[in-house]
Each structure stands twice: as structure tokens, then as C-alpha cells.
Image (cartoon, rainbow, N blue to C red):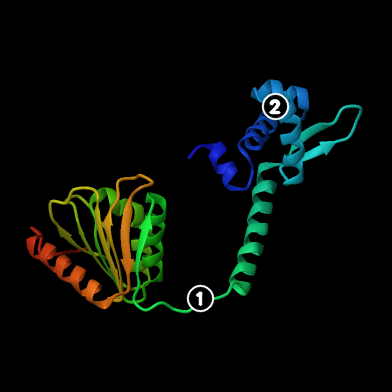
């Protein structure tokens, strides 16, 4: 993710993000100077600068010609975090809780959303985590697995040769990148394949028969392991 894309995640448009970076780099500027520095058409630059100020990314310096200065990066980020936390707290308080569905099968699409689900499942685990991931995929959730180990959970990983993880039980097999299987607390499962693309798709469920089916699949992989389980 580029710097501009990161700024856009905070609610700025692309033009506003480019202007914010330019103001941080060059110092205060008027609309003409900002347009020249960024290559943004002058009319668009004036509009984007005004909007950037409204969103808390720039200060307006009054004078014969309006000039703009970037809000310091630390201050801008702190403000974004504060307002986002306030908004999220309100959502948690006020958003209606839907009626619980019974053992749903949920399709999760998009690489980023799948990795987020992998991380959240492991963070929410209370007793044990079983994963079948290649060296490439296990890197996406390594921090969460180590945290689970630190919380005293049982962590079992079926993975590629060369993976090291202190505190986990590792089973080594020839595992190609792509397929993923995660079981948490014997109550929820995520299975599918990822390649880093937006059209990646995985199935998530709390359906007990599916959980048991994937558990049997992991047991078969363990039987194929050349290590017999390495406790680290």
C-alpha cells in the first residue's frame, strides 16, 4: 500500500492526499503553487485544498491570498484515531444486533478480508488453534499465533519444512502455497484457497459436521507428516 493509499484510508480523496503530502514536503502554499507542485488542475486543487482543511488535514492562513499549511503528521494521525475510535464505540453501542443464525455457511471473498478473518479467529480463540498453512500463508498470521501461544493456548501447525515457531507443535509436510484450513476451539472453521487477489474465496462456518470433516482432513495430513510433530 502506498502513502497516498494510506492517506485515502483516513477519509481523504486522492487529490487531497497528494496535496497533503505536497504541503508536508514543501511547506505552506497557495492554490496556484499547490497545483503546480502536484500537477493537479488548478480548479481542482483549490477545491481539494478547501476540502482538506475541512477534514482537518490543513490549516488556512488568511491574507491577500489564501495559503494552506499541513497539519503536522503526528497531530493529524492522532485526530484520525480519536475520531475513528469515537465512531467505532458509538457503532458498538447503538448498532442493532441481528438475530443469531444457526450454523451458517459464510463465503468470505477478497484476500484482505480472508486474512482479516484468519487473524480474528485466532485472536478470539480460548483453548486451541489448529492451522494447515504453507510457509507463505503462515507468515500472515504468525504474530497472532505467537500471541495465542503466549496466552497459553494449544497451537498446532501443519506447515512447510523450515517453519519455526517456539511453543507450537509443528507437523511438516510438502505443502504448496494457497490452500488454507483453520480450526479454532473445535467450534469454527475457515477453509479455502488464497492467492493474494480480490476474487479469492473461502468458506467460514460454525457448522459442527463441517468442523469435524476438516478436523479429519487435518488428522490425515498429520499422518503424512515426516516429523511426527515437533514441539518447540
Secondary structure of the residue carrying numbered label 1: loop
Question: Which residue is disc 1 drawn over?
Answer: 98
Look at the picture and state if 65 lies above or below 113.
above
Instruction: Using the image as rendered, state which of residue 29 and residue 204 is in the foreground.
Output: 204
Question: Is residue 210 left or right of 174 when viewed as pictured?
Answer: right
Give the percent coordinates (x, y) of residue 114. Answer: 37, 56
Look at the picture and state if 50 lies above or below 203.
above
Residue in view at x 71 percent, y 30 percent: 44
Total marks shown come to 2
Residue in view at x 10 percent, y 64 percent: 228
2 vs 1, front mark: 1
Q: Quadrant of residue 43?
A: top right
Quadrant location of the C terminus?
bottom left
Residue in view at x 51 percent, y 76 percent: 98
Give the percent coordinates (x, y) of residue 195. Answer: 30, 46
Give the percent coordinates (x, y) of residue 62. Answer: 88, 34
Q: Earlier in the sequence, mark 2 or mark 1?
A: 2
Instruction: Using the image as rendered, state which of residue 111 and residue 161 is in the foreground.
Output: 111
Q: Quadrant of residue 89?
A: bottom right
Q: Quadrant of residue 143?
A: bottom left
Label 1, residues with CA under 10 Å away: few <14, some 14-19, many ≥20: few
| Labelled pair 2, 1 in contact (Cβ < 8 Å) | no
Q: Which numbered tag is attached to residue 26?
A: 2
Amino acid at each position: 500500500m502506498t502513502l497516498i493509499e494510506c492517506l485515502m484510508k483516513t477519509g481523504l480523496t486522492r487529490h487531497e492526499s497528494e496535496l497533503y503530502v505536497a504541503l508536508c514536503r514543501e511547506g505552506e502554499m497557495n492554490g496556484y503553487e499547490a497545483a503546480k507542485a502536484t500537477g493537479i488542475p488548478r480548479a481542482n486543487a483549490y477545491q481539494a485544498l478547501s476540502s482538506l482543511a475541512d477534514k482537518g488535514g490543513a490549516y488556512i492562513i488568511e491574507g491577500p491570498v489564501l495559503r494552506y499549511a499541513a497539519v503536522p503528521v503526528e497531530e493529524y494521525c492522532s485526530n484520525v484515531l480519536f475520531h475513528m475510535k469515537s465512531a467505532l464505540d458509538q457503532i458498538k453501542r447503538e448498532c442493532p444486533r441481528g438475530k443469531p443464525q444457526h450454523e451458517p455457511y459464510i463465503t468470505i471473498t477478497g484476500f484482505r478480508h480472508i486474512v482479516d478473518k484468519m487473524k480474528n479467529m485466532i485472536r478470539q480463540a480460548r483453548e486451541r488453534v489448529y492451522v494447515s498453512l504453507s510457509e507463505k500463508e503462515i507468515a500472515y498470521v504468525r504474530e497472532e499465533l505467537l500471541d495465542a501461544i503466549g496466552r497459553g493456548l494449544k497451537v498446532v501447525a501443519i506447515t512447510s519444512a523450515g517453519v519455526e515457531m517456539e511453543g507450537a507443535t509443528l507437523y511438516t509436510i510438502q505443502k504448496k502455497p494457497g490452500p488454507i484450513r483453520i480450526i479454532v476451539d473445535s467450534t469454527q472453521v475457515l477453509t479455502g484457497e488464497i492467492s493474494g487477489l480480490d476474487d479469492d474465496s473461502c468458506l467460514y462456518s460454525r457448522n459442527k459436521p463441517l468442523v469435524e470433516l476438516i478436523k479429519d482432513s487435518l488428522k490425515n495430513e498429520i499422518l503424512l507428516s515426516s516429523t511426527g510433530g515437533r514441539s518447540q
